[in-house]
Image (spheres, rainbow, N blue to C red):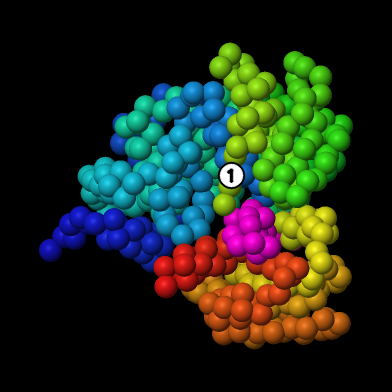
Amino acid sequence: MEEAFDTYGAAENYINATPKFTKKNSREDTARFWEFLGYPARQCKVLHVAGTNGKGSVCAYLCSVLHKAGISCGMFTSPHLVTMRERFLLDGEMISEEEFLEAFHVVMEGVKSFSPGAYHPTFFEFLFFMAMVVFEKYRVEYAVLETGLGGRLDATNVVDEKKVCILTSIGYDHMEYLGETLPQIAGEKAGIMRRGVPVVYPDRCEEVTRAIEECAKKIGAKTVPLEKTAVKEIKIQNKTIDFSLHLLYYDYIGFTVSTSALYQVENASLAVRALELLQEERITVPVMQEGIREAFWEGRMEEVLPSVYVDGAHNVDGIRAFLETVKRHSCTGRRILLYSTVRDKQYKEAARLLSQAGLFDKIVLAPLQGERALSLSQLTDSFRQYTGFDKKAYDTTEAALRALLSQKNDGDKVYIVGSLYLVGEVKALLRSLKDD
């Protein structure tokens, strides 16, 4: 008997199970299925974001400003932290379980009718098509799309009509798919570019900039680099950062990001530069200032409890950016780190950076849940060679978190970092502890 999928949980379970019976599809197959569905959300003005670090944050800044300008906006991002619905935002609000289920059924009916047995969307493709169905239903004017791990071959790249493309910082991650060098990785990410469409990117690594510019020249995309000199006068407050950004049609203008994460200055600046290129009368300078200030993105140096921070840094560049922010946090007590990650990340180098930073009095390790988790023995082995501070291992994230919270003293700061999956586990645990 065919499953009815009449609940949100049933639909979510089906999508979670798709990796077990699907394979990577060609971009042509993915595009054909989008066509079969009737090109949902094709009328939207698309802002497409790729890169290694900062993609979700840039998307959040873009949507916050669009919403402040009174412009309807849909956002599709990944991964989610606690619930799959987080991947779909309409004007900054997560879709309901009912809306999720309705979009699921539209895609599922398409799967049953389109080349039965010959094609099935992957996990990410299924969610992307659901997002486009949702955006179509609500007739959003702008669709902000975040790529998955790549760019050129990403499911979101079936969309050809785009208003602006944004490439965030490029670093070493997913090298088995994207290439071993930064220019190779940048080239894959740059695959989202289109002829005549402006592409915004940070101009801070010469070989990455050269790779992006070469790709842009081949297809006739317009390059709009965010120059190093565009940002100045960065002033870090307690829970905000003020900075000045040189706009395309103005001089330096002051902005504020409501976070202590230094890396968000660049992400907010990239979003502003992209928004300028839209030349929307509704997006004024005050609107951009307010939208940037009011933007919030979970899991990025987020203070989940007083002096307890979670950060989704999951690769070497992300860890370095995390450490730069920690350095600037004043602390009258101990700095304590809880670290975990998945096994396909550069965890040995991350362990070296975190251990040798000289910032933490105690490092706590615990394995994540799930098949991709790095084992506790691998975690402890990666830190074992580094001494000079207290190390403690726990069998579960919950045990580690309970111990940290019970042992935290006034003046201490706790940092939880290594994976967005870890952030999701911690946020779910905190919710359950609150409900106890």
Vertical position of residue 130 compared to residue 385: above or below: above
* Image quarter hosting the C terminus: bottom left
Other residues around mark 1 within 10 Å, as few (<14) / some (14–19) / many (≥20): some
Q: Residue at x 66, y 80 (%)?
A: 407
Vertical position of residue 128 compared to residue 172: above or below: above
Vertical position of residue 320 compared to residue 292: above or below: below
Q: Residue furthest front?
A: 410
Q: Residue at x 35, y 30 (%)?
A: 138
Magenta region includes residue 398: no
Image coordinates for residue 44, horizontal then vertical, percent: 44, 26
Q: Residue furthest top?
A: 281
Q: Residue furthest left?
A: 1
Vertical position of residue 432 compared to residue 137: above or below: below
Q: As shown in the figure, which amino acid type bears the numbered disc 1?
A: Phe
Q: Nearer the viewer, residue 251 or 217?
A: 251
For the question of whether residue 165 can be seen, the reply is no
Q: Residue at x 73, y 32 (%)?
A: 255
* Image quarter hosting the N terminus: bottom left
Magenta span covers which residues? 299-317
Q: Secondary structure beneath disc 1?
A: loop
Image coordinates for residue 69, horizontal then vertical, percent: 54, 23
Image coordinates for residue 400, horizontal then vertical, percent: 60, 79
Residue on which the image places disc 1: 296
**Horizontal side, residue 174 vs residue 36: left or right:** right
Image coordinates for residue 176, horizontal then vertical, percent: 64, 60
